[in-house]
Amino acid sequence: MLKKNLLIGACAFVMGAGAMAYVGQTAQATAQPRAQTYRLLELFGDVLDIVQKQYVTEVDDRKLIEAALDGMVSSLDPHSGYLAPDSFEDMQDTTRGEYGGLGIEITSEDGVVKIIAPMDGTPASRAGLQSGDYITAVDGQSVIGMPTNQAVKLMRGAPGEKVTLTIAREKTDPFDVSLVREVIKPKSAVARMEGDYGYVRLSGFNEKATDEVTAAIKGLQAQNPKMKGLVFDLRNNPGGLLDQAVGVANIFLDGGEVVSQRGRAANDIERYNARAGDMLKGLPVVVLVNSGSASAAEIVAGALQDRKRAEIVGLTSFGKGSVQTVIPLRGGADGALKLTTARYFTPSGRSIQRTGIEPDLEVASSREQAQLIATRSFQYSEASLRGALDTEDGSKRRGAHAPAEAPPASFDEEGCKKRTTSMLELKCDFQLQRGLDVLRNGSVAATPKLPKPSPQVASVVDGRVVPATGGDKPK
């Protein structure tokens, strides 16, 4: 039976990228009949019978049972769940890199739909939707408490049709955003030259990712045969296919391990290695990451960091270090299970589940972002998801702290806020500026550091909480 290894980025259902590993069903006999389990299954049947007979209106048995299946599996962790047949088909369309929708990857957080990341060049990106925004209603219909797959159905539709999303954003009153559905054919990789250095942005790991990154780099090499280095941008990349993560890492590595995944049993270990041949022939590489970089993006960043092939600039990544396997039920006729089956590990043996990939040079993209990192212990990440799988070694994600660097006062944040394109020009992209500085200076260690931002924090005066009055100011 054909097996295809994949890895979902960040969370569950997507209007953007993501998928996992497909395998055939295998029957596993239990050692002994479990009377307690059978009794509970009888209880399930009893409850179903009572609902069928006594609920105030007639019920749809299929919907009831599908909801029960999803509730059972999704109680394990945020990334496991039951996919009804239409949701399974939607997921397959998404991983092929072409589908109808808005271009958003979403998850569910405490019953609320939350945006992980808008995809480049899509209606969501052009409308200025942001990572961390909450979607509270679709065309006036509340999606609070709604299963994620149902919310996805409301947002998807025929290309050309309008849909209105109600958005809740921190420090902002709820507002409506009108978008027009499109056939989403996201170009995963885009590239340009920044002086003598190449820049490639990868927005997701669908089936075309490796080929597109390869073509992008070849295009830069043809444009400037004397290119001195490359910035590889994985910010807000929610992940995708495992085989594409290995393929992309292979572009930069000259053989050796990229990642390993380890299941429940001690001997259940699978290793993935790069082939010989570094496409850039040793040219220096900087990888940009942030809290929206998840799963497959973290595999690549972790592999290049561990193998000393690249230095990492930006913010600690999302911390999604688990592998999901998609198990079709009756060939997909009854949908599929999406089940967490393993953790993945970087070449040095790090499990980054919950903790994420910490950058070699920590750089906030704005003074406001630096303020939030310094004054809030809560940051949106895998560790903030209820029921997230623990790390094996008990390590914790770094809490509130002042980031090493943030844009200085001379950086025109107000002017840049008015720009909504996903690929900002260099003068508005402080993290990219610092990544290029690292390339020019040869390493993070050799790059002159900026003054550490001094966050403005709330204080207590005469028993009253006095909020901060300003943003970060360099010392």
Image (cartoon, rainbow, N blue to C red):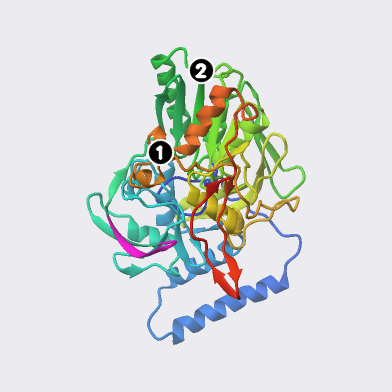
Q: Which amino acid type is shown beneath numbered disc 2?
A: Lys
Residue at 29% across / 54% down in the picture? 157
User: Quick check: can you spot residue 414?
Assistant: yes
Residue under the point 53% across and 19% down: 279
- Tell me where residue 83 appears, x and y as whole percent: 48, 57
Q: Which of marks 2 and 1 is in front?
A: 1
Q: How far apart are marks 2 and 1 (CA)?
A: 23 Å
First reached walking from the N terminus: tag 2 or tag 1: 2
Instruction: Tell me the element at label 2.
Output: loop
Query: Vertically, is 417 above or below 299?
Result: below
Image quarter of the N terminus: top right
Q: Give the range drawn in magenta.
A: 169-178
Image location of residue 294, percent across then percent down:
54, 45
Estimate how packed mark 2 is, as few (under 14), some (14 to 19) or many (20 or more) residues with alpha carbons within 10 Å.
Answer: some
Q: Is residue 254 rendered magenta in the image?
A: no
Find out whether the residues at labels 2 and 1 contact each other: C-beta distance under 8 Å.
Answer: no
Residue 375 at x, y percent in the picture: 58, 58
Q: Is any part of residue 3 visible from this angle? A: no
Q: Circle 2 sits on which residue?
A: 228
Q: How crowded is mark 1: few (under 14 residues within 10 Å), some or many (20 or more)?
A: many
Mark 1 lies on residue: 428
Most foreground residue, 77 or 42? 77
339 or 31, which is in the foreground?
339
25 and 245: which one is in front?
A: 245
Instruction: Say what amino acid the circle numbered 1 marks.
Output: Cys
> Does the magenta stretch mainly form a helix, a strand or a loop?
strand
Tell me where residue 151 sits by quadrant: bottom left
Could you tell me residue 292's position as x and y percent?
51, 47
Q: Is residue 83 above or below residue 227?
A: below
Which residue: 67% across, 54% down? 28
Label for residue 358?
none
